[in-house]
Amino acid sequence: MKKIYVIIAITIVLGAAIFVTWRQGLQINISDSKKYTDELLGFSFAYPVTYSISSFGSPDDNAGETILIQKEGGEKGIQVLITPFDEDIVLTETRIRSDIPDLAITDVYTQKVGTRENAVQTVVFTSINSLMGKSNEAWFVYKGKLYQMSAPVDVHDVFATMLNSWEF
């Protein structure tokens, strides 16, 4: 339980750093996309050609790996935080609420991500915090890692495209 609090704290700090670079009201064209592939963890997803990707950290470190997908110029951003997770579980809304009771969670639903052979149940929800404001979130556990995807609500189309194109 303590581990998930540390993960949330890291997510909030990184989210705040991204938030500083965001500007609202920009249109995002997702008709043309590129594919990001993480060879080490064996996953990929599509993202708009007008975005760039950077990553830092390591998925095996306690602090984890952070992948930032940002509109060129740093104006919009989506964050994927990947951290070690010592339980082999299907993450649920109940578990998230139990571990982080103060986390604001609304509009919750589950969705499968990945290919049919490797589909993983994902908890998708909207959250609000004082640093980032309202955000879309998608969290799941896969092969010993907790994946937390976070995006401002005004880039929902990009968030949904990434989530729907995720493959293992």
Image (spheres, grey):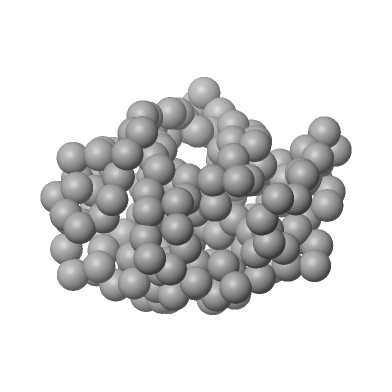
Q: Is residue 159 left or right of residue 96?
A: right
Q: Which residue is more in the foreground, 116 or 154?
A: 154
83 vs 93: above or below? below
Q: Is residue 5 left or right of residue 7?
A: left
Quadrant of the image occupied by residue 60: bottom left
Quadrant of the image occupied by residue 35: top right
Indicate the position of residue 28 as horizontal and vertical percent values: 76, 44
142 vs 120: above or below? below
Q: Is residue 161 left or right of residue 128?
A: right
Indicate the position of residue 88 as horizontal and vertical percent values: 27, 47
Q: Residue furthest top?
A: 116
Q: Which residue is more in the foreground, 92 or 12?
A: 12
Task: Give the residue drawn at x 66%, y 55%.
Answer: 24
Indicate the position of residue 44 as horizontal and vertical percent values: 65, 45
Task: Give the residue drawn at x 70%, y 50%.
Answer: 25
Please indicate, yes or no, whether residue 144 appears anywhere in the rendered image. Answer: yes
Task: Give the residue drawn at x 83%, y 48%.
Answer: 49
Total numbered labels:
0
Task: Give the residue drawn at x 73%, y 67%.
Answer: 74
